[in-house]
Image (cartoon, helix red, strand yellow):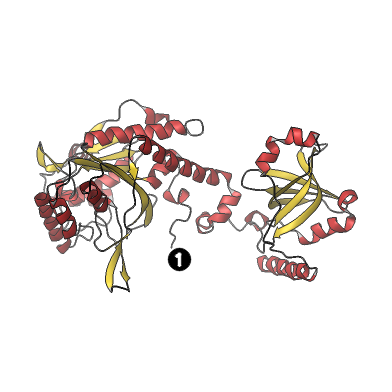
């Protein structure tokens, strides 16, 4: 059936060309969006103002002397009315024969209200702007599979206004983040995506190569170490919004390519950035408050819970318990990707990722272990823990931040410890970055850093069930 429709439309294209009509002209005389037309409908219809609009044909009905056609642009929808006593019988027949659902049309005419009370444009001229070969899904029920929505997002956006609205919200959220940070005195910067040494997180990277220099390169897993170089270079309040890449599994919370914001503040602490992240997110909630209800995020107190204490309360284990006890508990909970060689702290982190789904209200989980926090300052009250925090909202890990490690000797020891873990089979252990150590030896001011997953934050604020709903083109398994 679909093949027959496509063949018929290709046939129409050839016929139009024989008539001297270009099915894909370069220019249009479009004057107004449909939203502008509707906003000025009363005065323009009263004055019989001639206007030219353009859009995609969304519905067709009627034949012979009168035809009705709904067209849509990005802003709204409007009915076109084609009458043979105005256009001539031949021109109406031409429209009926050659124009299909999905085609783009330019229409000129005057505004009026039909007997049924529908705002419309009475056409005195029209032109084809783009001939579609495939019918829209609603015409042949070709987008029923939920996975197809993500594979062919362009059709999903056409068919589902709520999906489109969620992406508009995403853009507004990112704009509001920029405006907020700029007002706070932060400077937006850019750092390399292609890196000779990946770093800034515990993750498995994507590997590529630079033919010109015959060297290996990695897609960045985080911009952290380059942003810290800028702190060393004298910048005090900086942020970057950009893509990161991690060669890991895909699920409702993970996509191999994702958007993050990282910011760094000299002379500030973990506590300062917890307050900043709370202020920022509450600001975003208020900006969307008329459209989306996130009132639970606006609660006055965002609690702080120790990482180990949270796990002890949930599963009854502490870091003093044997590894076998942690491994057994991980298996009971159905935690995947457990390596028996992993440290207790690494296993605890994987268990935490499983259990954080029970946290609904905004909560800071603090004092993560040293072993899994190679770039954070030690907690002076417990050297085996760090001055780090995670922000969890509605079960999603939204942000990660800490008072930054600026001791080059300590950082070098941490890298050596990570190298040992990597040798023992931990693919996500942090690599050594000698160039960063050298930069650190020149001196970095006391500072704090914060990373926020933009995709996850948008998912939480727009009540999306998964990242696939708020990434335009999420990565999909090949068919």
Q: Residue at x 14, y 51 (%)?
A: 442
- On the image, which quarter does residue 129 sit in? bottom right
Tell me residue 458's x, y (percent). Answer: 42, 43
Q: Which residue has dot 1 on it?
A: 478
Expressed as whole percent of the image width and height from the top left, the position of residue 93 reads 85, 58
Q: Decide: is 386 above or below 24.
A: above
Q: Residue furthest top?
A: 300
Q: Is residue 236 left or right of residue 77?
A: left
Tag 1 secondary structure: loop
Any part of residue 255 in sight: no
- At 51% from the left and 30% from the top, the residue drawn is 290
Q: Count of labels shown?
A: 1
Residue 369 visible in the displayed image: yes
Instruction: Tell me the quadrant of the picture where the N terminus can be found.
Output: bottom right
Front in this rendered view, residue 236 or 89: 236
**Left or right: where 82 falls relative to 52:** right
From the top left corner, tell me how far across and down residue 476 is, in percent: 44, 60
- Pick whichever, 60 or 335, lies toward us: 60
The residue at 25%/34% (across/down) is 272
Q: Residues within 10 Å of mark 1 (few under 14, many from 20)?
A: few
- Using the rendered view, name the quadrant where residue 380 is placed: top left
Give left or right: position of 93 versus 21: right
Q: Position of residue 26 (x, y in %)?
A: 67, 61
Residue situated furthest front in the rendering: 234
Q: Considering depth in this image, is 184 or 376 the residue closer to the camera?
A: 184
- The correct choice, above or below, for 453 with respect to 193 in the image is above
């Amino acid at each position: 059936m679909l093949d027959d429709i496509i063949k018929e439309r290709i046939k129409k294209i050839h016929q139009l060309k024989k008539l001297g009509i270009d099915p894909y002209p370069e220019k249009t005389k479009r004057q107004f969006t449909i939203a502008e037309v509707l906003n000025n409908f009363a005065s323009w219809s009263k004055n019989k103002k001639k206007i030219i609009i353009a859009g995609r044909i969304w519905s067709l009905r009627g034949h012979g002397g009168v035809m009705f056609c709904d067209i849509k642009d990005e802003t709204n929808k409007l009915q076109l009315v084609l009458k043979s006593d105005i256009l001539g019988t031949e021109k109406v027949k031409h429209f009926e024969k050659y124009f299909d659902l999905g085609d783009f049309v330019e229409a000129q005419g005057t505004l009026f209200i039909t007997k049924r009370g529908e705002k419309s444009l009475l056409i005195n001229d029209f032109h084809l702007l783009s001939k579609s070969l495939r019918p829209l899904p609603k015409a042949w029920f070709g987008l029923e599979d939920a996975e197809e929505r993500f594979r062919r997002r362009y059709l999903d956006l056409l068919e589902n206004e709520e999906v489109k609205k969620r992406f508009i919200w995403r853009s507004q959220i990112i704009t509001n983040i920029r405006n907020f940070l700029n007002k706070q005195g932060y400077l937006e910067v850019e750092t390399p995506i292609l890196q000779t040494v990946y770093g800034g997180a515990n993750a498995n990277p994507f590997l590529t190569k630079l033919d010109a220099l015959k060297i290996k390169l990695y897609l960045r897993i985080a911009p952290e170490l380059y942003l810290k170089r800028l702190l060393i270079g004298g910048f005090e309040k900086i942020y970057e919004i950009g893509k990161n890449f991690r060669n890991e599994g895909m699920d409702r919370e993970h996509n191999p390519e994702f958007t993050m914001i990282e910011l760094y503040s000299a002379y500030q602490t973990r506590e300062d950035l917890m307050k900043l992240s709370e202020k920022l997110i509450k600001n975003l909630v208020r900006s969307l408050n008329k459209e989306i209800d996130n009132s639970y995020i606006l609660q006055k107190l965002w609690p702080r819970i120790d990482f180990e204490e949270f796990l002890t309360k949930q599963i009854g284990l502490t870091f003093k318990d044997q590894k076998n006890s942690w491994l057994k508990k991980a298996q009971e909970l159905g935690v995947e990707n457990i390596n028996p060689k992993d440290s207790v702290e690494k296993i605890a982190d994987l268990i935490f990722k499983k259990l954080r789904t029970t946290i609904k209200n905004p909560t800071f989980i603090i004092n993560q272990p040293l072993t899994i926090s190679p770039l954070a300052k030690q907690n002076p009250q417990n050297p085996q823990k760090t001055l780090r925090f995670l922000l969890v909202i509605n079960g999603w890990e939204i942000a990660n931040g800490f008072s930054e490690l600026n001791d080059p000797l300590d950082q070098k020891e941490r890298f050596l410890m990570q190298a040992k873990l990597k040798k023992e089979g931990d693919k996500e252990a942090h690599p050594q970055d000698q160039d960063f150590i050298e930069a650190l030896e020149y001196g970095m001011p006391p500072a704090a850093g914060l990373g926020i997953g933009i995709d996850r934050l948008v998912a939480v604020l727009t009540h999306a069930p998964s990242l696939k709903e708020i990434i335009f083109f999420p990565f999909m398994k090949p068919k």
